[in-house]
Image (cartoon, helix red, strand yellow):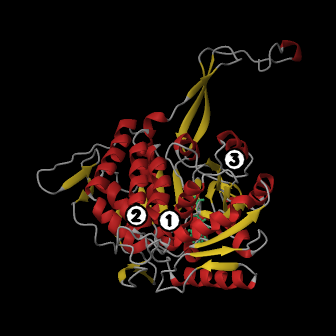
Amino acid sequence: MVARSASRSSDRHEARVADGSKVQTRDPQPYDRFELLPIAGSWRHGQADHRLVDTNPFTGDVLLEIKQADRRDLDAAFAAAAKAQVEWAVSAPGVRAQVFRRAAGVMEARRGEIVDWLIKESGSTRLKANLEWEVTHTVMLWASSVPHAVESRYIPSDIPGKENQVRRKPVGVVGAISPWNWPLHLSNRTIAPALAVGNAVVVKPSSDTPVTGGLLLAKILEEAGLPAGLLSVIVGAGSDIGDAFVSHPVPRVISFTGSTPVGRRIAELAAKAPIIKRIDLELGGNAPFVVLADADLDQAVEAATFGKFLHQGQICIAINRLIVEEPVYHSFVERFTERVARLKTGDPRDGDTMIGPIINNSQLQKLMARVHRARDDGCKQVLGAEPDGLVLPPHVFVNVTNQMELAAEEIFGPLAPILRVGSAEEALAVANETSFGLSGAVFTRDLHRGVHFAERMQVGMAHVNDQSVIDLPTCPFGGEKNSGIGRFNGSWAIEAFTTDQWLTAQHAPRGYPWSASAVQGPWS
Ligand code: NAD
C-alpha cells in the first residue's frame, strides 16, 4: 500500500512507501531541464547511442538534446511498470483520485511554463497552447473522478448457491504512443484515465515533442505524488523502437494516436505479438464541413475559419474539405477568403497569431508538394503565399473535386479546398465518399434537417451548426473506417483501460448431473 508523507516545511516534498524507503523527491524547480528520462522509477539517460535534438520550429533554436532510450530501457520500463502496478491496482480509489486532483493543481501553478513549452516545442500559437492547457487540465480533473466510477456487477445465477460477480479490473500495463500535434493532451488522455483505474503506463511520445508529449506530464504527476515506476517515458524514434514497443509481452493494451499507415502496422504487430493484445487506434481524418443553402453564412464562415486553421490545420479533426451548396457557393467563397486573409500569421508567442509554424521542414515540404500538385490537378488557388521559415500562410483553393488529392487525402496543414455541390443529397454523398470517418459538420438554419443530415454522416463525431474541432472529456472521441477503432473520454476510456473478469463463488455444495435424466435446467 502506498502511504505518502508530504512535508511542505521547506520547498522539499517526499513520497514514501510503507517500508519507509523514499520513492520520489520533488523539488518545485522550474520545468527547464529535460535531458533525463523517467524510466523504471528514476530519471536517467537513455542507453541508445544517438541523441535526439529537440528544436523550436519557429526560431530554429535547439531546446535540448536527449540521449534516447533503447530496447534495454524499454524492457526496464515495462518490467518496473508491471511490478509497480500490482500495489497501485489495489490502492484505495481515493488515493488515486488525490494524485489527479493534485496534478490539476500543479498544472494551475505551472500554467505559464506549460504554455511556454507548448509554444516553443510544438509550434503552438499562444491561443492553441492555452486551449491545450485547458483541455488537459479538464481531463486531469475528470480523471480524479474516475477511480470511483469503476463499477463491478452481480448477475443472477441459474446454479443454486452460486454468486456471479463481474469484476472490472485494470488491464495491467498500458503502452501509449502519441503524435506531435496536441502532444500534452493526446498523451494525457491515455495516461490519466489508464493510471486512474489502476494501471501503469509506458508512453512513447513523438520525437518532435518529447517534453510536451511525455516528460512534462511525468514531472507534473511526480510532483502530484504518483508513486515511482508507474509512468515511464521512452524517447526514441518510432522507426527504431516502435515495433519492440508494440510487440512487447508486458503491455495488455496499446493506445495509439497517429497516422493511419502506422496504425495499420500497430494492428498487425498486436495480432502477431507473442501475447496477443488489445489496441485502441485514433488515426487520421478527412473532415467534411458542409454548408447547405439555408445556412447562416456569417456563422458558417467564422466556424470554417476556426475549424480549418487552428494550429495551422494540423489537427486530425480539422476541416479537410469545405463542401458548399450551389446557391451560396460564390458568396461563401468570397466571404471565407476575405476572412482567412485577415488571419495573423507569424510569431506563435503573440496572443493574436492564428497561424504559427508547421512542426518541421519535412511536413512543410509535404504540404508544398500538395500545393503544387493541387495546381497541376486544376484547382484554382484564390489565396496563398510562399512560406516564411516554417510559417506557411493560409491557402484557399476552389474548383476542387473529391477525386483530387487535396480532397481525397488528409491535408494536415493550412490548405483549404472548397468543393461545390448541387444539392444536400450530393453534399452528403461527397462528404461520405472517403475512406476516413473521424469528424464532420453541417451548417443549416433548419436544425431538424441538420440532425437528419448529421446522423447519416459516416463519422464518429458529427456536429450541426459548429465546426469539427471539438473534444469534451465526457463525450466519446473516435472514428469510423480508416480513422480508427475505439473511443476516448468518459466511460469509454474506463472501458478501454479495464477488463471484465467473471468471478463466481459457490456458497453451498452443489450437486452435479451425472446422467441425462438428471438434467433439469440449462446449467444444472
Ligand atoms: P505518426 O503516425 O507518424 O506518429 C505517431 C506516433 O507513432 C509517434 O510517436 C511516432 O514516433 C510513432 N511511430 C511511428 N512509427 C511507429 C512504429 N512503426 N511503431 C510504433 N510507433 C511508431 O503521426 P504524426 O505525424 O505524429 O501525427 C499526425 C497524424 O496523427 C495524422 O494522421 C493525424 O490525423 C493523426 N492524429 C489522430 C488523432 C485522433 O485522435 N484520431 C489525433 C491527433 C493526430
Q: The C terminus appears in which quarter of the rendering?
A: top right
The image quadrant of residue 346 is bottom left
Q: Is residue 157 left or right of residue 104?
A: right
Instruction: Give the residue type at disc 1.
Output: Leu
Looking at mark 3, is its residue's CB closer than 8 Å to ligand 1?
no
Identify the element where label 3 is drawn. Answer: helix
Q: What percent of the width, then of the height, locates residue 128? A: 43, 63
Rounded to the nearest angstrom, the CA distance separating label 1 from label 2 is 9 Å
The reply to whether callout 1 and callout 2 are in contact (CB within 8 Å) is yes
Rounded to the nearest angstrom, the CA distance separating label 3 from label 2 is 29 Å
The reply to whether callout 3 and callout 1 are in contact (CB within 8 Å) is no
Looking at mark 1, is its residue's CB closer than 8 Å to ligand 1?
no
Q: Which residue is mark 2?
A: 127
Q: What is the number of the mark on residue 454?
A: 3
Q: Which residue is mark 1?
A: 310
Other-residue count near label 1 (Cα within 10 Å), few / some / many at <14 / 14–19 / ≥20: many
Rounded to the nearest angstrom, the CA distance separating label 3 from label 1 is 23 Å
Instruction: Give the residue type at disc 3.
Output: Ala
Residue 463 appears in view: yes
Q: What percent of the width, then of the height, locates residue 265? A: 68, 67
Residue 251 appears in view: no
Q: Earlier in the sequence, mark 1 or mark 2?
A: 2
Q: Is residue 164 left or right of residue 100?
A: right
| Quadrant position of ligand 1 | bottom right
Residue depicted at x 76% and y 74%: 404
The image quadrant of residue 184 is bottom left
Instruction: Give the residue type at disc 2.
Output: Leu
Q: What percent of the width, then of the height, locates residue 71? A: 52, 72
Identify the element where label 2 is drawn. Answer: helix
